[in-house]
Image (cartoon, rainbow, N blue to C red):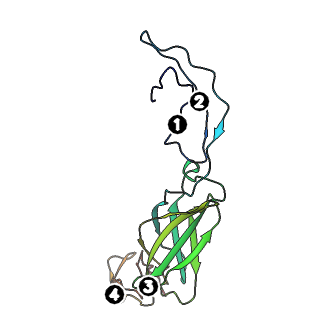
Amino acid sequence: PEVVNGKTHKATVVDLSPWVEYEFRVVASNSVGIGEPSRPSALLKTKAAAPVVAPTNISGGGGSRSELVITWEPVPEELQNGEGFGYIVMFRPLGSTTWTEAVVASVEASKYVYRNESITPLSPFEVKVGVYNNEGEGTLSSISIVYSGEDEPQIAPAGASALSISAAEVEVSWQPIVWNRHTGRVLGYEVRQP
């Protein structure tokens, strides 16, 4: 801390965080050393201010058909800077110029799900998440790309064939489904006996 002249009886403490409780102590010093600290002052809360820290780890994806799932890491309480804290979620289809905006009025929120039947499966969206409180809006995160939910695969595997290996075993093979927006990401196959 800054040393204050011995003839001065007050000081201004700077660079404190908004909407945080502080207590202070004063110590006297001279050429011999530093004395005992005073008793702590009463707790004092600094004034609120608009938040300045944007959420991090903006991602998402998954969900059901016709859904856009957006997730983020919540802003810690000490960085919310005031009461009435919440999130502003903004998104638009990749290549679009118009943003859709949603307000999530929950301090603990870390997810927003947008549902719309017109969303094409696995469509890329530009997404950013901001913050606000009773004092105003804060900063927005940088843009992240998030994909809408998938649909079940619309194409069956081709070229299925079976080869008898033994009296109790048959080897089944097929050509894998190539990824595209209509097939989605194939996570596995089921082999069924008709």
Q: Amino acid at mark 4?
A: Ser
Mark 1 touches mark 3? (CB < 8 Å): no
**Real-space CA distance between mark 4 and mark 1, rounded to the nearest whole angstrom:** 78 Å
Q: Amino acid at mark 1?
A: Val
**Real-space CA distance between mark 4 and mark 2, rounded to the nearest whole angstrom:** 79 Å
Residue underneath mark 4: 161
Residue underneath mark 1: 13
| Front label number (1 vs 2) | 1
Q: Earlier in the sequence, mark 1 or mark 2?
A: 1
Residue underneath mark 3: 97
Q: Using the image, tell me which numbered label, if any, was put on residue 78.
A: none
Q: Amino acid at mark 3?
A: Thr
Mark 1 touches mark 2? (CB < 8 Å): yes
Q: Using the image, tell me which numbered label, if any, was put on residue 24.
A: 2
| Front label number (2 vs 3) | 2
Q: Amino acid at mark 2?
A: Phe
- Residue 100 placement, left or right of 44: left
> Under tag 1, what secondary structure?
loop
Q: Earlier in the sequence, mark 1 or mark 3?
A: 1
Can you say whether 153 is above or below 137 in the image?
below
Where in the figure is residue 174, as x and y percent of width and height? 33, 84
Q: Earlier in the sequence, mark 4 or mark 2?
A: 2
